[in-house]
Image (cartoon, helix red, strand yellow):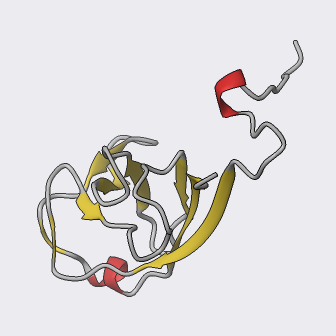
Amino acid sequence: MAVTASVPADLRGRGKSFFQIAVAQLTFSGSYTAGGDTLNLAGVVPTRKAPVYVVITESQSGYDYVYVPGTDITSGKVKIFQQGSAAGAFVELAAGAYPTAITGDTVYALIIYPSNV
């Protein structure tokens, strides 16, 4: 079976630049909150609309970072997962102070957001 790709009708740019792309470095400090910490992208992208897609780079420290969309550009969350006790299983980081491995990690987010056209 082959893999195919197409652009859904509601995401077509109709001849204009429909999406913009931004890259941001994420810095973690303080304490992690269960369910994820809020990631406010208002200073990174020039729109109030929620991002279409955010992918966060693989961790250098062995943690996985996942973006959870919010209702607008200020209310998304970053959830952090670590290797669990079962092989291949990941569990959410426990609430509490960020480990040094995370605060010292270099993490980037690729943000695709709607343009204002």
Q: Name, please, the residue furthest toward the top.
A: 1
Measuring from the top left, give residue 58's x and y in whole percent.
Answer: 55, 63
Q: Position of residue 5 (x, y in %)?
A: 82, 27
* Residue for point 45% across, 66% down: 62
Give the percent coordinates (x, y) of residue 18: 69, 48
At 75% from the left and 40% from the top, the residue drawn is 13
Left or right of residue 91: residue 23: right
Q: Quadrant of the N terminus?
A: top right
Left or right, 71 with respect to 107, comes to left
Which residue occupies the foreground of this view, 113 or 58? 113
Give the farthest residue toward the left: 96
Q: Residue at x 40, y 57 (%)?
A: 48
| Horizontal side, residue 23 vs residue 83: left or right | right
Does 25 sit above or below residue 11? below
Q: Is residue 51 left or right of residue 36?
A: right
Front-lying residue, 91 or 30? 30
Q: Is residue 104 above or below residue 45?
A: below
Which residue occupies the foreground of this view, 21 or 83?
Answer: 21
Q: Can you name the residue that lies furthest to the right here?
A: 2
Furthest-front residue in view? 117
Residue 78 drawn at (x, y percent): 33, 58
Number of numbered markers = 0
Dividing the picture into quadrants, the one containing residue 105 is: bottom left
Quick check: 35 above or below 56?
above
